[in-house]
Amino acid sequence: MSSSNFLWGETVTLYGTKFEGHFAIAYLVISFITWAGLVYTWLSSRNGNYFGNDALLRTAAFKFLAWSRIFYLLAYSLQIIDIFLHEEELKVKIGYTFIGVFRDGFWQISDLIVLMIVCRITYYQFQIWGAYTIFHATWQFLCMFSLTTLAALALYRWAVTTAYTIMLLNGVSTAWLQRFVNEAAELQTGYQVLYMLVSTFIIMLTVYHLGRRTAFREKLNIVEGLFFAIALLLWIRSIARLDIVVKYTLHGALRPDYLNTAAEACYGLPTLVIYLLLNSLNRPDPPSVAKSDILREGRRTARKELKRRRIDASKGGPELPTPAQMLTEIELKPLTYLPDKTQTSLSSLSDTEVRDTISQHIKDVLRLRERI
């Protein structure tokens, strides 16, 4: 019998529960929610038109966002179909086994692209947040090296998995099949470990840079909050995925009925939220970001200046000005307590936004004076 006749002539019956188990229904529901959510993010997405020194980096960061979403949609479409076929215990051609190979490939590509997008966002975002030049160049190199290694591991594992499927269909001995199963499990574990390490470094560096900018007492602006949420979800997702792979794939523990549902809840839903957040981040920074940065720098400068004046006053120098005196001083020179770099940022705002920003800056300085 030719291989084509074997693949599309022989039939097998898929195993399922006829949707009698709650976990099977939950697995289908979560998968469908993720699929529908990805469709929504696709329909609501739009490409940002960037300007400025980091325009090329921003454009490159989101260059493959649409492609990653397409591959995820393909993977989840196959997954939903597969759930229905298994739960209905239908008879299918034995060649249907290759569906799992294609689904795994689609998932692998999109999973890697998501990490690449987040890494590329750090290339410009960490610079904006004050990353040191040498440190930032080292971080870019580590990202590129890690992504290349992950791509190699993913491609090799996918090839091993494909070879295993082909040999399984051709009736190769169990001993040979087990060797491929073990090798694929080791490769997948290595991939998830490295993925988790990169995700951990991203969240750690994000917290570090935001801590330097806010001293952990200032509110995050919209862009900072969006990226922090993306980095956190990426890290949580990688931890959950690694735990499942190590316990059930590498060590071969008995897989409970709820595993697919739990895995999808810890991976699929966070992935959907990440895409929603990436959609919000894939556009030029709103004026509120520049305003937030200006006011934040103004408060930082005002604290330092008031602290210096208080120390001088304690050593017999000029008395610390009263709130009324400070109000007169800052009304005469509204840009007082604003560093030069933030004063130039005012040019990016409209006249109304400039007036609102300066008004808020005055209030912030007076509020700081009243606390002393």
Image (cartoon, grey):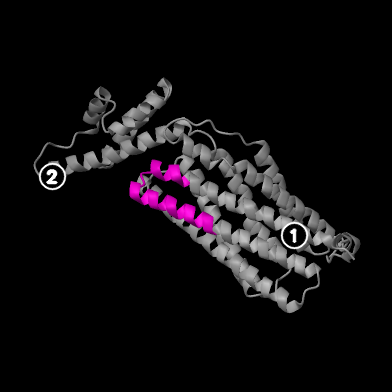
Q: In which quarter of the image is residue 313?
A: top left
**275 over 46 or under it: above or below:** below
Q: Position of residue 340 (x, y in %)?
A: 28, 31
Q: In this rendered view, identify the residue nearer to me: 206 or 116.
A: 116
**325 over 181 or under it: above or below:** above
- Determine which residue is flagged by label 1: 100
Q: How crowded is mark 1: few (under 14 residues within 10 Å), some or many (20 or more)?
A: some
Q: What residue type is labelled 1?
A: Gly
Q: What range is drawn magenta here? A: 122-149
Which residue appears farthest toward the top when viewing the image?
351
Q: How crowded is mark 2: few (under 14 residues within 10 Å), some or many (20 or more)?
A: few
Q: Where is residue 250 in the image (x, y as percent from the top left)?
A: 62, 72
- Determine which residue is flagged by label 2: 314
Q: Where is residue 312 in the image (x, y as percent from the top left)?
A: 13, 42
User: Could you tell me which quadrant the N terminus lies in?
Assistant: bottom right
Can you see residue 103? yes
Q: In this rendered view, identify the residue nearer to me: 367 or 311.
A: 311
Can you see residue 220? no
Element carrying mark 1: helix
Does the segment drawn in magenta span residue 328? no
